[in-house]
Image (cartoon, rainbow, N blue to C red):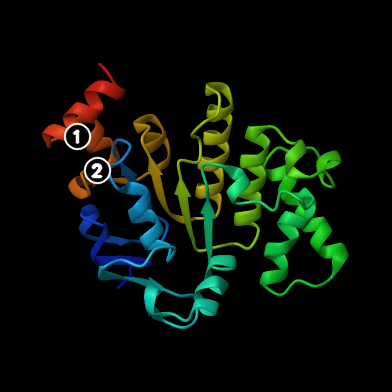
Amino acid sequence: MTTPILSAKGVTKRFGGRVACRGVNFDLWPGEVLGIVGESGSGKTTLLNCLAGRLIPDEGHVAYETASAGTVDVHRLPEARRRLLARTEWGFVHQDAREGLRMGASAGANIGERLMAIGARHYGDIRRTASDWLTRVEIGLDRLDDRPAAYSGGMRQRLQIARNLVSNPRLVFMDEPTGGLDVSVQARLLDLLRGLVDSFHLSAVLVTHDLGVARLLTHRLMVMHGGDIVETGLTDQMLDDPQHAYTQMLVASILPV
């Protein structure tokens, strides 16, 4: 029987008197892309950060099925072990690529850092792999030694994706990966992401407020409102026939008939 790659049980996080997410339960299966959707302030980014070990929930726990050491409780891992997972078996794509890149290092060095975290040491091999990944994310090889500060917003986001995927992670967290980009740039990035997710059979958790992005990239959706999961189901089914009043409102306002 297949084991979930990630499981959340009763995950709750408060900030003072405000509940950002409450009693969240779900299993993420190998090769599945789960979308978390909702308006700004619904709690979806807080939940994502709890899942990725960046925030400690007040209640509940998050279990991850590692490649070689079985199931671990994400928030009970020693900090060094959690950082190692984040550099090797996990990826995290930020909305603002500057948060996920070393802006003072070259594009090649940004990709090479992840390779070194999984044991690569030969400079020539690292540079060749970095070049290959620039090509995969449609960045010219003449930009390998440029710093991300010299890149456009869309190129930075593609570089951040290459930095995350070069280590062949098993699980990727994505926080509004197309947010803040022009529509034409978004479309190109979405095509790239969909191809990479399929090619590498990635498991992923995607936070977005854009239901068009969710339809293109996800298999299953969870809708958040006021910190609660109000509806969950297969993406196409939920977007074509939403049951909860809040989901109906989202679909009507963002994907009008």
Q: Determine which of the numbered discs, if any, sits on residue 32 in the image.
A: none
Task: Decide: is 220 above or below 178.
Answer: below
Residue 164, above or below 211: below
Rounded to the nearest whole Å, what is the CA distance between mark 1 and mark 2?
Answer: 7 Å
Please report the residue visible at 50 percent of the width from the left and 41 percent of the height from the top.
177
**Tag of residue 223:** 2
Determine the residue positioned at 24% across, 44% down. Answer: 224
The residue lying furthest to the top in this view is 257
Of residues 16 and 104, the one nearer the viewer is 16
Q: Which image quarter holds the N terminus?
A: bottom left
Please give the name of the residue rendered at 50% of the width and 74% of the height, measured from the top-left corner.
Answer: 82
**Three-letter amino acid code at the position of disc 2:** Val
Residue 150 screen position, x and y as percent: 77, 36
Residue 64 image-quadrant placement: bottom left
Point out residue 51 in the picture as x, y percentages from the top left corner.
37, 62
In the image, residue 40 above or below residue 3:
above
Secondary structure, mark 2, is strand
> Is residue 175 at least partly visible in the picture?
yes
| Amino acid type for the residue under numbered disc 1 | Thr
